[in-house]
Amino acid sequence: MADHNDPNAVNSIFSDIDVSAADLYDIFGFPIEDTTGGEKVYIALTFAPVPEAGVFDTDMLYRLRMHAHARPVPPSRRDWSLDALLKYFDAVKDKYLGDFKPAEIRVTVGGDQRARVSFKGFPGGSFDAVVDLDRVTTIDSPDGHAIKAFLGGRDDAFFNDLPGFFRSINYAPQFYHVPHSMTEARELPIPKTLLELEGNHLFNFDPANPNLGRGEKKPLPPGPWTWEGDRFAKDADGNYRFVYSGEDAQAGRNINAIALEIPLEFITRSPAEERIVSTWGESWVLKAANKIETIPDNPFWLEKPLTAIRTGRPDDELERYKLVDTDGQPFADAGLSEREDNRQLGANNFFLAPHFVKRLAHLGWGFGPSIGALGLKSSFDHDDAPVSVHRTYASAVTAFPRARKVIFQALNMPDDSWNPKGLNIPPRRPFEIFVPNVCAIDMDTTGSWPYGRRLEDQVATRFLSLFLDHEAELNGKPVNVETLGDQALWDAAPIVPKSPPNPLRNDKEFLAEFPYLAEPW
Amino acid sequence: MIAVSDYEAELERIDRDIAALAPDDVAQATALLSLRCQRASLTGDLAALPAVEGEIDAALAEYGTWPDLCVVKAGVASTLHRVADARRALELAPGVAEHLPGRAMLADLDREEGRYEEALRGYEAALRDEPAWDTYARLADLTSKLGDADAAGDLFAAAVDELTAKQMRSYAWVELQWGRMELRRGRHDDGADHYARASAAYTGWWLVDEHVAQLLAARGELETAAALYKDLAARVPKPELQHAAGDTNAALGRPERARPFHDRALAAYRASAERGEVHYLHHLADACTDAAEAVRWARRDLELRPNAYTRAALAWALHRAGRSGEALDAIEGALASPLRDARLYGKAATIHRAAGRLAESDDYERRAAALH
C-alpha cells in the first residue's frame, strides 16, 4: 500500500476497475555503498505488471523526476506553531511554482518492446537511448557517465499486510462489494484503530471467514456503518486482537520496474554541496486523440481529401499524454490523500497542506488510543481517550493543536547505522517528509527511510511510528521508527497475534547487485 | 491470421466476459447485466434490452437496491425513452443521483423533459465535481443545440482531452457527436474530418458507417449513401437504418426500392409499439403513412417526453394531417424553448408557409440558414 491501487481511477480493489499499467506502486532510492568511480544513487520506480511482468504497455510514458539540492538547515529554535508550518508550506510552494526545472528520465516502450529512455535537463545535457527490456544495460551519457538501467519484470519489493492496513482504517472495498459510485462507503465512519473494537462486526477478524478481505468479499450490509461501542475487544484471556496479521499480502506477486543507478555527478555539478537527491515518479497515458496518429487511415477515407489529423498543441511530448498517478513517499496517497484522483500532484502537493493536518488528526484519534492501550505513549493529543474515536475536522486550525507533535516531532532511527559518516544530519520530521511528496535521498546516509527508501525498509511499520511519541523511551531505549517492528514489544503486550504489524522482510531475497530487485516469480 | 476490427475484438471480449461470469453476488450480477447492456448498445440491438431489464429487476429483488444496478436500470430505461422509469431507478438507492454517472443521467432526463436550463446547470455542476469526458460531451451537445456551436466545439475538445488510449471507442463516439454537430452547421468537410478520426480510432464500427452515410447523403452523394445504408441495414438490427435506406432510395426517385426498406422499418416500429415500448414512437410518427395515426403516436411521445423535438414532431404530424392551425400552435411550443436548431426552424418555415404565413416562413428559413 505504499502507493498500490491509487488514485481511484486505477484502484483495482473496486471490482469494476481493471489493473492498470498506470498504477504506480513504489519508488525506492538510496546511495550506492560502493563509491568506486564516484558516488551513485539508485532509483527504482515500480508499477503494475500490465500487460504482464517483463512486458510494458506501449501507451504509457513513465517519468522519473529528480533534482539535487543542499540539505536544509534546521530551524535554530523549536517552533512547533501553525505559523511555522504555514511558512514552510509557503516556501515549498514558492519553490515548486517558481522557476523550478527538475531533470527527468522518461521511458516509453514501442511495439517492439524496446524502451526509449530520454534523459532531459541534466547538467551534461539531454539525450536518448534505446534499451532492451529485462536486461541490465549500461547507458553512456555524452559527457562520459555510465548509467546502469534495468527495465522489466521483477518480484514486488513491497512487503506488507495490506488487509491489516485496510482493517485499521475500515476501508470497505477491501472486504465488501462497494460500487465505485458509492463514495460514502469507502472508509466507513468507524474509528481508525490498531486494535479491534468490541462489536465492530464489519471489520473484526471473523474465524468463520478467515479470507474475508484476502481475496474474498461479501455484500456490504445495509447501514448505518457506524460503531456504537466503548472499548477495545478482548478475548477470554484478556488479550486485545491486533488488526494486523504480519503476513505479506504481496508475496508471490510481480511488478514492472524502471531501475537506474546514476552517478551523482551526472545529476549535479555540485555533488559536494548538493547532498540530497529528491525524486518522484509519474505515470502518463497516451491521449486517445494522439493514438490515432499511429493507426493507418481506414481505406474508405483514402479516397477523400481529408485534412491532416489534428495534432493539438506544439510538439511537446507530454501534451500527448495525460497524468494519472504520482509516487514520492510511501503512504502519502493511501494514508494521507485518500487516493483522490485530483490529489495526484507529485512534488506539487503543497496545496494539500491543510488536508494533511486534518487527516493526521483524524488518523491520530484512531491510532493514538490504540497505542495508549498497549502502554506506549502517543504523539497525538487524544485526551487519554480509552478507546479509538472517529472524529473528522473541517478546519486545519482546529485540528493542528492535536496533531502538532505528530507533525513536528523529530523521528528517531533505531541506531546510528543510517548515518555511516557520523555527520551532524538533522533528524527528519513528518511535515518535511510528506510535503513535498518526494523521496528525498540523503547521499551521506544509507538512504534508509525517511532519508530515502531502501528495498528492505518496512515502511508501513515506520509510517505508523509517526503516532508514537519519539521523545519517550521504551525499555530504556528511545522510541524510534522501528519500535513497532520489535518482536519483544509484542511478546510482552496483551495482544494476539504476537507479531509486528507487518512482515519484517520481503518474500524473496533482494539481489546483492544491480538491479537489486529480486527476480520475478 | 485474419485481422479483426476493434469492434469485432471488443464484441468477442464482451462475449467471453459474459460467458465467464456466473454471478453469485450482487457485484458479479451487476457486472454481467452491465455487460449485456453494453453488448446491446454496441451492436445496436435494442430489442435485447427489455429482457435484460427483466433480469435487472430480478437482481434488484434478490440483492436489494444496489446503487450500480440502479444506474444500469436507469440507463436501460433512458435508452428506451422511459424517462419517468429512469428517474425512479435513480431514486431507488440514496445518493445515486448525487454522484456521477447518476448526476449526469438526471440532467439527461431533465433535457428529455424539456427542462433545458436545468439540464445545463446539472451538467455544469457535475463537471465542477469531476471533469468526466462524457459529461463534457453531453454539455457540448446541449450547448450546440442552444445555438453556441463554438462553445460546443470547445467542450467537445475538452471531452476528447480527457480520453486516453484505453478508451478508443469512447473517443470515436465523441468524434462522431462532434462531427454531427459540424454537419448540422453545414460544415461537411469538418464533419468528415471528425468521422475520419472516429473511423481510425475504432475500426469496424457500424455507428461510424451510419454517420458516414448521413454525411454522404448530406453531400448529395446519394448512390453511395444508399449502398452504405443497404449494407448497414443488413448487418445491424436497427429499424432506423431500414428507414434511412428507404428514404435515400426515395430521394433517388426509386420508390420500388424504397418500399421494402420502409415496410420493414414500419413493421419493426409497430411491433415495438405493440409490445408497449415507446422508444420508436417518434420514428413511427414519422414513418406511418396514415396521418391521423402519425398524430396519435406523436402525441403519445410528447406526453412521455415533453421537449422541443417531440413538440416539433407533433407539429409535423399535424401539418401532414392538414391540421394547419394546430400544427402552428405545436411548432410555436417547440420554438418557445431556448433551443436554436436548424431542423426546428426548417419545420417551422414549412408549417408557416402551409398556413399562408409567408413572412414568418421566410424568417425561419433565414434563421435555419444562419445556423448553417
Image: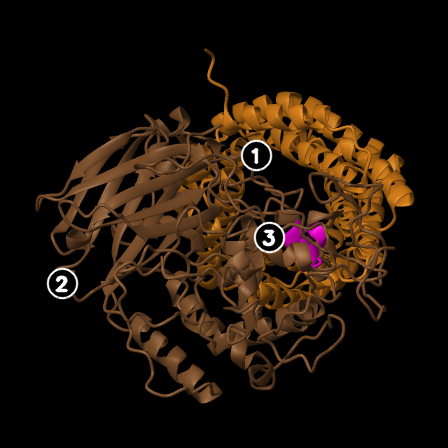
What residue is shown with label 3?
Answer: A487
Image coordinates for residue A330, horizontal then vertical, percent: 48, 56
Q: Is residue A392 left or right of residue A52?
A: right
Please tell me whether mark 1 or mark 2 is closer to you in this view: 2
Q: Chain of mark 3?
A: A
Amino acid found under the numbered disc labelled 1 = Leu
Residue beneath the point at 27% across and 73% down: A98
Q: Please indicate, yes or no, whether residue A66 appears anywhere in the rendered image.
A: yes
Q: Chain of mark 2?
A: A
Q: Main secondary structure of the magenta part?
A: helix
Image coordinates for residue A262, horizontal then vertical, percent: 22, 47
B296 or A104, which lies in front? A104
Magenta residue check for A165: yes
A243 or A339, which lies in front? A243
Please tell me whether mark 1 or mark 3 is closer to you in this view: 3
B44 or B244, which lies in front? B44
What residue is shown with label 1?
Answer: B207
Q: Is residue B242 left or right of residue A334?
A: right
| Label 1 crowd bin: few (<14), some (14–19), many (20+), radius 10 Å | some
Residue beneath the point at 37% across and 61% down: A416
The count of marks equals 3
**Color style of the picture:** by chain
> What range of the chain is rendered magenta?
A164-173
What residue is shown with label 2?
Answer: A270
- Give SS at disc 1: helix
Amino acid found under the numbered disc labelled 3 = Gln
Name, please, the residue furthest toward the left.
A143
Picture colour for chain A: brown
Above-or-below relation of A433 to A264: below
| Label 2 crowd bin: few (<14), some (14–19), many (20+), radius 10 Å | some
